[in-house]
């Protein structure tokens, strides 16, 4: 199954949100 462009964008956004959450936790 090939990844669609939308899937890639969703994946990248998810990873970015996880990264931001991790940074927020580290700052807390």
Image: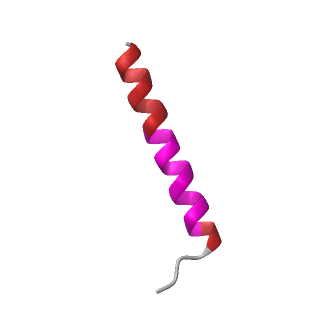
Q: Position of residue 12 (x, y in %)?
A: 54, 54
Q: Is residue 2 above or below residue 20?
A: below
Q: Position of residue 22 (x, y in %)?
A: 39, 30
Tell me: 25 left or right of 2: left
Residue under the point 47% across and 48% down: 15
- Please tell me in which quadrant of the rendered image residue 4 appears: bottom right
- Residue situated furthest right in the rendering: 5
Residue under the point 61% across and 60% down: 9
Q: Is residue 2 above or below residue 10?
A: below
- Residue situated furthest bottom in the rendering: 1
- Please tell me in which quadrant of the rendered image residue 24 appears: top left
Colour convention: secondary structure
**Any magenta on residue 28?**
no
Q: Is residue 8 above or below residue 25?
A: below
Q: Is residue 8 above or below residue 1?
A: above
Count of marks overlaid on the render: 0
Majority secondary structure of the magenta segment? helix
Residue under the point 53% across and 77% down: 3
Residue under the point 52% across and 43% down: 16
Q: Position of residue 28 (x, y in %)?
A: 37, 13
Q: Position of residue 18 (x, y in %)?
A: 43, 40
The span shown in magenta is 7-18
């Amino acid at each position: 199954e090939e990844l669609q462009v939308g899937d890639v964008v969703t994946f990248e956004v998810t990873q970015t949100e996880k990264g931001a959450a991790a940074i927020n936790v580290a700052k807390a």
